[in-house]
Image (spheres, coloured by chain):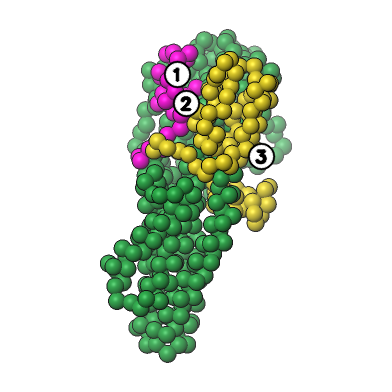
Amino acid sequence: MRNMTYLPGVSTLTLDTSRCNGCRTCTLVCPHAVLKMANGHAVIGNRDDCMECGACALNCPQEALRVTPGVGCAAYVLQTWFKGKEAACCGESGCC
Amino acid sequence: MKNDHKAAMSGERLRLTPGIKDTRPHLPYRAVPGILPEVPREKTDACCGTPSGLMTPPSLTSGDAPYGHCLQGHVPSPVGPVPRLSTRLTARDYWGGLKVRLGLGRDRYAMPAGLYAVGRPGPRSPVLVTANYKLTVDALRTELSTHDAWILALDTNGINVWCAAGKGTFATDELVHRLKASRLDQVVTHRKLVLPQLGASGVAGHRVKQRTGFQVIWGPIRARDLPAFLKNPQKTPPSMRRMSFTLKERITLVPVEISAAFRPAAWSLGMAMLMALLLGMAGPAPFKTVLHTMLLGVTATVVGLLSGAVLTPILLPWIPGRAFALKGAFLGLAAAFISLLAVYPDMTVETSIALTMMTIATSSFLAMNFTGATPFTSPSGVEREMRWAIPAQALVVTIGLIGWLQAVWAG
C-alpha cells in the first residue's frame, strides 16, 4: 500500500522553525517521513501524511514541534465519547 | 486468566548455571534484585509485604508459562547471570503465535520484563530495548541468531511497542526504571541504547540521556532490518524508517478483526432475532415464512461482517474514498448487490432495500473500526469521520431493521 494519506487537512502538527536547531531527530522518528531537512532545519513535507503519533514532538529537544498526539482508532474514540478519556481503552478485556 | 504468571511465581526457581561462580558475598542468587526479568508489575503486586526488588524471581522454566521454553541457560554478567533467549522458534512458539493472531489470549501473552541476552554478549555488546509482548520478543530474537546482544524488555503489560508507546507504557519513565532495576550501567561499559523507531511516541530520547546518561539511538521500525542496522547504524535507508501496510500485513490482521467483531455482532444479531421472532409469531405470516425472512436478516449481517472486517482490510487501497466508513459502505453496497443476485433473488423491493441497508451499515461500522489496526490513521481524522459516520450508520441500520422487521411480520 503506497499511498497512506488519510483525511486531508486534519493534522494538528505545527513546526516553529525559529526554534529548530537542526538535530534531525524528528526526521529519524517520523514513521511517514513527514519531516524533512531543508537549509539546516526541519520542514514539514506532506502534512496530510501525519498520523499524529506524537513521536516528533516528544523527541524534539527544542520543543519546536507540536502536535496533539493520540491513537487513530474508532473503537477508542467511541469509548472516549461514552466513558470519558480516562476509562477508554482499545482491547475488549484487560485494558492495554 | 493470569494463570501463566501465577504458575510462574509459584514454580521452581532459576538455578545458577554450573560453572558460573557467584562472587557476591552474601546475597543468594535468587535475591539479586532487578537483574532478573520481573513478572509484569500489576501481577507482582499480589505478593504484598515483600519489597518488590527483593522478591523471589519468577520461574522462567515453568511449564505453563508461554516463555519458559525460549530460554537457553544464562550468560554471566557483572551483576549476575542473565537469562539467555534462544534465537530459534519452536513448535510451541508458532502455536502460541498462531493463537494470538487468531485473537485467542492476546491480552496475556507476556514475557517477564527485564534484561535478557542473545548469543554471548559482553560489556561492549549492543543493548536493544523492546516490549514484553511475547510475539514482539519472538520477532526480535529470531533476527539475532548471529549476534551477541543484550535485550531489555520493558513492562508494557504484554502489548507491542507501538501500541504501548501510544498508551504510555513503553515510556521514558519505564525505560529509566528498567535501566536502573537491571543495573545495566554495570553490565555494559558503553552508554548507548538501540530503541525501535516506533517507540519514539512514548520515549523521549533526550530525557533518557539527561536522566541516565544513556544515549537513545533510534533503530529501524522492523526487527528484520536490525542486522543491517547494527552493521552500519549511520546509514539507514529511508525504507527502514517508513511504515508499510502490505497485503500480507493486512491479511494477518483479518482474524483479529473477525474475533473482535464477533461478540458484538452475535449479541446485536441475537437481540434482533428475538425481536423478529416475537413479531413474526404475533403477525399473520406462516411460521416458515417468518423463519425464512429472519434468516435473510442473518445473511445480510454476515455479508456486512465479511465486507467490513475481511474484504475492507484486504482491498483497502483499491476501495474508493478516504474515510474508512465510506470505504466500508461502498464495499457493503457491492457485497449486498452480489448477494441479492446470488442468495436471495426473489424478494420484494422493500425487503431488498432493507437488507442492503443492514449490510451497508454493518460493513461501514466495521470498516471504520479497522482504523485502529492501520498504521496511518490520525486521531483527528478518525474523529472527523466518526462525527458524520456514526449518525449516518445509526440511521441506515435503523431504517434497515424496521424494513426487515416489517417484512418478518407481514411475511
Chain depicted in green = B
Q: Provide the secondary structure element on which disc 1 rests.
A: loop
**What chain does mark 1 sit on?**
B
Q: CA distance from mark 3 to mark 2?
A: 38 Å
Q: Which residue position holds label 1? A: B236
Q: Are marks 3 and 2 on the same chain?
A: yes
Residue B283: image location, x then y, percent: 45, 88
Q: Which residue position holds label 2? A: B241
- The amino acid on which the numbered mark 3 sits, given as a three-letter code, is Asp
**What chain does mark 3 sit on?**
B
- State the residue at coordinates (43%, 55%): B328
Chain depicted in yellow = A
Q: Provide the secondary structure element on which disc 3 rests.
A: loop
- State the residue at coordinates (64%, 54%): A81
Q: Are marks 3 and 1 on the same chain?
A: yes
Q: Residues within 10 Å of mark 2 (few under 14, many from 20)?
A: many
Could you tell me if the residues under marks 2 and 1 are in contact, i.e. CB atoms within 8 Å?
A: yes
Residue A62, picture quadrant: top right
Question: Which residues lie in the magenta part?
Answer: B219-248
